Amino acid sequence: MPEMQRQTTESTEPTDPQPFRTREPEIAIVVALGYVWAAFNTLIGLLLAVVFYRARGFRWSDGCLEAVGGSFQRDGKTVTRIWGRPGAQTWGWFIVYRTEAHVAKAPLRVHERVHVAQGMVGGPLFLLAYGLHFLIEFAWTARFRPSRWYDAYRRVWAERMAYRIEDEFRRGLRPNAWGANPRYFLGN
């Protein structure tokens, strides 16, 4: 009897790490619930973006709403309105970048999407947990180095996870991380 050849089912297409692109209804429902659960944080971010940051260039990209925080010129320097001078801030599934140049940085996009995923799991409790951990770390850090908010920021559990995944992306261990290859659906 001739030996039957096995057919391989390996796909040559790259894996699509986008959490909102799925054909399985159970996963789609969980992802949809994550968007609803994170909607409160998203609304806070949108309010901050419109009122304080004067954000512009809103667009939907890779399952997230993105914008660029407003900036203005003062004494020949560009001043941005985002608090703390980060490259971006994430509120629920809304990301506001400091400048257009920051939007183009793939490692930053990956980092911020880790926070989107965290927010979709934690919902309104994510802001509470993040803020509480930051305050504890800041109080502890201030004992040794006054006014060292950056040290406290880097010690927050959510930031440690986001920086770890960003670092793995930079080293090529996660080449298809969520946000690495932007797909824009609105705007640019």
Image: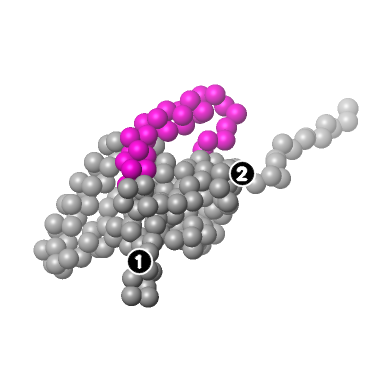
Q: Position of residue 162 (x, y in %)?
A: 39, 52
Q: Is residue 178 something that shows in the picture?
A: no
Task: Give the residue at x 41% y 44%.
Answer: 94
In this figure, which residue is indicated by the disc labeled 1?
79
Q: Quadrant of residue 69?
A: bottom left
Residue 133 badge: none
Where is residue 151? Give x, y as percent.
25, 63
Q: Which residues are magenta?
A: 19-48
Q: Position of residue 24 (x, y in %)?
A: 57, 27
Calculate the distance from the C-alpha at mark 1 to the C-alpha at mark 2. Answer: 39 Å
| Kind of element beneath mark 1 | strand
Quarter of the image for the N terminus: give it. top right
Count neighbours of disc 2 (C-alpha within 10 A) and say few if under 14, some if 14 to 19, many if 20 or more: few
- Residue type indicated by callout 1: Val
Q: Main SS of the magenta segment?
A: helix
Residue located at (14% from left, 63% from top): 142
On whether residue 68 falls in the magenta region, the answer is: no
Q: Are marks 1 and 2 in contact (CB under 8 Å)?
A: no
Front position in the image: 93 or 107: 93
Residue annotated with mark 2: 15
